[in-house]
Amino acid sequence: MTLDYAADSHAAPLAIAEVMERLGVKMNFAKDEEIFAQDEDADLVHMVVSGAVRTTRLLSDGRRQVGAFYYPGDLIGLETGAVHRFSAEAICPSIVLVVRRSALRAFAGEGQLDRAIWEAARRELERTQEHLLVLGRKTACEKVASFLMSLAQRESAERVQLPMSRQDMADYLGLTIETVSRMLTQLQGASVVEFDGSRKFRVKRWEALEEMAA
């Protein structure tokens, strides 16, 4: 199967994507199944083919922090260090290409792998900055509105898929699941967004959503 990664600005560098397709083993993961664990050796490189993935970290008090969400074409777990700082789980049934870092280095070359690592690091920095901006919103409604707007902008479709659960959203936004559910109901009641079930929505009033997220 050939994937058009070049069409997605969030996709992995094309050369690495091609090598991943040639060398990678496709692995299927069920909903909530672990792809790799926190503090596990980072000797494998992963790329999402279909579905969606979240990274999480358990805090010392037992709470879970969702670090980021990854979609088709995204590299996950391409660490600059020797171990994974976060664990990764499939949000929904997902297919992930897996390649040993040593095989990738031998096939693509040291320079190409280093560039891929730095590109992945740059994108992780962007994700971290976006996450900090969301967490810095003053109200729960602003946080939820900003999150929905980022998803809608990414997909650029009338109906936007919401692969993550309400609990995933809460752990990403630093809110309780009750607060997230209440804010979503509030946004729908104000005709800012319209939900089709629990995992798909449409933005009805872009200006209102942007104002809330600003």
Image (cartoon, helix red, strand yellow):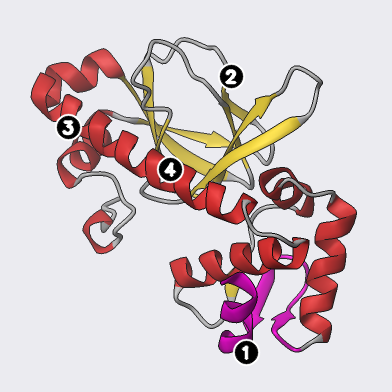
Give the total of numbered labels. Answer: 4
Q: Choose between 127 and 106: the one closer to the eye.
A: 127
Badge 2 is on which residue? 37
Q: Earlier in the sequence, mark 1 or mark 2?
A: 2
The residue that mark 4 highlights is: 48
Alpha carbons under labels 4 and 1: distance apart: 32 Å
What amino acid is at disc 2? Ala
- Distance of label 3 from label 4 (alpha carbons): 19 Å
- The answer for how far apart the CA atoms under marks 1 and 3 are is 41 Å
Q: Quadrant of residue 33?
A: top right
The residue beneath circle 3 is 115
Q: In the image, is residue 51 part of the stretch drawn in magenta?
A: no
Report which residue position mark 1 lands on: 205
* Distance CA(mark 3)–CA(mark 2): 25 Å
Lower sequence index among marks 1 and 3: 3
Asked if the residue at tag 2 contacts the one at tag 1, i.e. Cβ–Cβ closer than 8 Å, the answer is: no
Task: Tell me the mark number nearer the camera, choosing from 3 and 2.
Answer: 3
